[in-house]
Amino acid sequence: MELLKNIMITAFIAVFAENTIFSRALGTSTLIIVARNRKNLAGFGFSVTYITAVISVLTYFADKALNANETGYIYTPLVYIAILGAVYVITLLCLWRFAPVIFGRMKKYIHISAFNCAVLGSMFLISKYCVTLADYFIHGLGIGLGFVLAVYLTAIVYDRIYSEKAPYAFRGYPLMLIYIGILSMAFWGLSGHTLNY
Amino acid sequence: MTGDNSCKSIIKNALLNKNPIFVSGMVIAPVIVLANNLNDAITLVTAFSLLTFFTLLVSSFIPKSIVYTIRIIIYTLIGALVYVPLAILLRYLMPEGVEALGIFFPLFITSSFIISRSESIFFRESKGKMLLDIVFCIIGYDAAVLLFAVIREILATGTAGGNIIGMPIVFSAFEKPFGGFILLGFIAALFRSILLLIKKIRNTNT
Amino acid sequence: MVSNKKSEFEIMTDMLIVLLVMSAVAVYYYGLRALAMLVVTVLVCCITDIVCLKLRKKKIDIKDLSSLITGLTLGLMMSASVPYYAAVTAALFATVAVKHAFGGRGCEIFNGAAAGFLFSALCFPDGMLTYPKVFTELPFSSVVSADMLSQSMTKTFLLTGTSSVSLIDVLTGKFLGPMGTGVVILLVVAAVFLMFRRSVSAITFFTELAAIGIYALIYYDFDLMSVLYFFSSGMLLFGMIFLSCDYSVIPKTRSSRFIYGLVTAVCVIIFHFYSGTENAVIYAVIIASPIGIELDRRALSFADMLKGKRRIFKRASKPLKNINETLEILEKNEQE
């Protein structure tokens, strides 16, 4: 029961309070690209969550090796990118070999779900905050889900943001920033509760 | 836009019409979180410019015949390799600044500049024009970040580059990430309406 | 499916009447500075609205009371001692960033008053979240000295779990808190009045009330007094009536109103349980409103799936009013 409660709280923090977009703004450029098309959302969400979950486990072992070395921090990005690339290639190969239909659908946007700031940022974040393997995994999963949540919340108002009724100066990109800003203001209430407000 | 390849239009697009920050929204994560005063912005801009320039420069030698799946890994690996000497250099030159950059410094490797810009520059015919494009895109980015950081610092803390200027009210919310989003949204809207105004004036003159 | 029996103007007048009564109580409790605050917020909202309309080259609609309502709601949510510039910031933000940037009346995604209050509270936490006692003489100066102010009853209640305010005082709103959001009796009367006039969605309101009520009962071990404190504190009841049931952001179909109420309630519960922020309902309203838009779309496509495409043509042939602009946009999307 205690374990379950801990898992719940860790997942909650990763998804809501430390949401990659709303409290750290990681991967905003990716969000702007992905939110355009609602049809790809499910596939994109699945692949991001899958990749963050898998790499979080690998990051754990990489961190163990890197922390043993004093100048490890310089090579950290190199190792992380190598992990990311390996996972990406292996996933694509597996899909291509065993599920060609899904491969055909996924290959358009799997590169953007693997190589973005949110995924690489999640590796740096979890190695900063987590200790045990379970921590790493739950955090990785939560960060992926949180990113998908943010993309979903933006995609559902996409037609409002790009509607003819919005003034020309604001239509599109500026309005999306303001929209994300107001939402992250609300999410700040969760992460910033150590502050006065 | 890729068809239009004259030097003048490349420079104009990079600085104004397709400004990376105010119009296209590239690499805005570190800007929103970190660029809340001039000093941090300068560190950010230095790190970004050096990393992106050298990575794109090396990337341009990668033959286009390799499939995109593999190429994207190579680009990011080059980025990670460029990061190694750069991290050592910057840690020596400005240790506090790099400390403040935190995880955002290595994150420049997967910035959309390197992921997607590296694709579009291959449409350029010659190496010279490509170099021009890279340089002016980075200049456009740097100028936008510095401008944004100055406005934000004045609004949020009432200082400019650390010197107190007499602001009657300061809006401390602009220091936080959500304030960055909102302020950047407003500046982007302002930027767009100024561009529109310039275009209108030019049309009436000719 | 769609309740468009009342025009938007009638809904707004109903809201305005209720808000004016509540403002009268606020002025009675806190004196002339409360009046000054309300005047400031309403004036700034209206003037900014007119300026924005002029800038966007749109016609000014005399029947548009929305900026008055936003101003009054915003004023009532503030403490009576808030510095004037904080109130002005909130009103400016509500009108410019939340209303006109998204395209003006009928196109808002968020509730203006909620977002404006939140922005101002995050900018000036000291000024916005300290409150004077009822019936104290407040000076007219912008900044009221700190020794007249103390933290709200909500904060005390959240920290200690109990409160020393008596039952009568809670019901009449005589406790440390925002100007007009604590008068429980008046709020209940207002809710009943607005629901009977069909200006506020009863479905959403009762869904929220039931869900939050059950949570509060369990959380406070079935202590009714604590539940009452819980509802009267932190603008909860006020927010449920005026912010989450606001006509401009609420979904337009019945089923989605039910789910929207549920989502808002869950958000309130999450914020109360995890973060212990003072005004959980404001955060909840902001997070729930984009989900409301999506729910509308889902409900429409679901209804179309059930009943064929005939309904769409029927509905489109009716003259659409401003409040139904959402439906218009949605239908266009469906047809595409």
Image (spheres, rainbow, N blue to C red):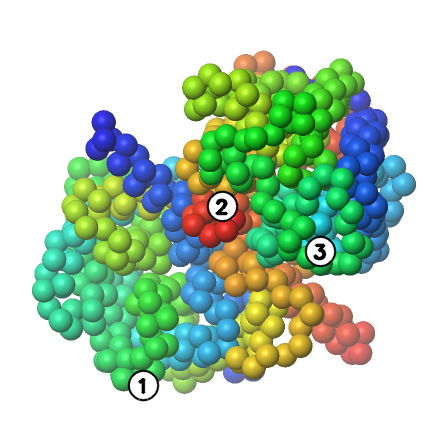
Residue B75, given in percent of the width and then of the height, sits at 28, 67
Q: Residue at x 43, y 19 (%)?
A: C221
Badge 3 element? loop
**What is the quadrant of residue B34 in the picture?**
bottom left
Q: Residues within 10 Å of mark 1 (few under 14, many from 20)?
A: few
Q: Quadrant of the N terminus of chain A?
A: top left
Residue C30 is situated, as x and y percent measured from the top left of the image, at 77, 41
Q: Identify the subunit bearing mark 2.
A: A
Does residue C56 appear in the picture of this structure?
no
* Residue topped by disc 1: B93
Q: Position of residue A161 (x, y in %)?
A: 60, 47
- Going by the numbered disc 1, the residue's amino acid type is Leu
Mark-to-mark CA distance, 3 and 1: 48 Å
Label 1: chain letter: B
Of A94 and C19, the residue lying toward us = C19
As drawn, A108 above or below C134: below
Would residue C236 be found to the left or right of residue A92 on screen?
A: right
Between C151 and B23, the residue placed more toward the observer is: C151
Task: Give the secondary structure at mark 1.
Answer: helix
**Cα separation between marks 3 and 2:** 26 Å
- According to the picture, the residue beneath numbered tag 2 turns out to be A189
Same chain letter for marks 3 and 2: no
Residue that mark 3 sits on: C144
Chain letter of the residue carrying label 3: C
How far is the residue under mark 2 from the one under mark 1? 38 Å
Farthest residue toward the right?
C62
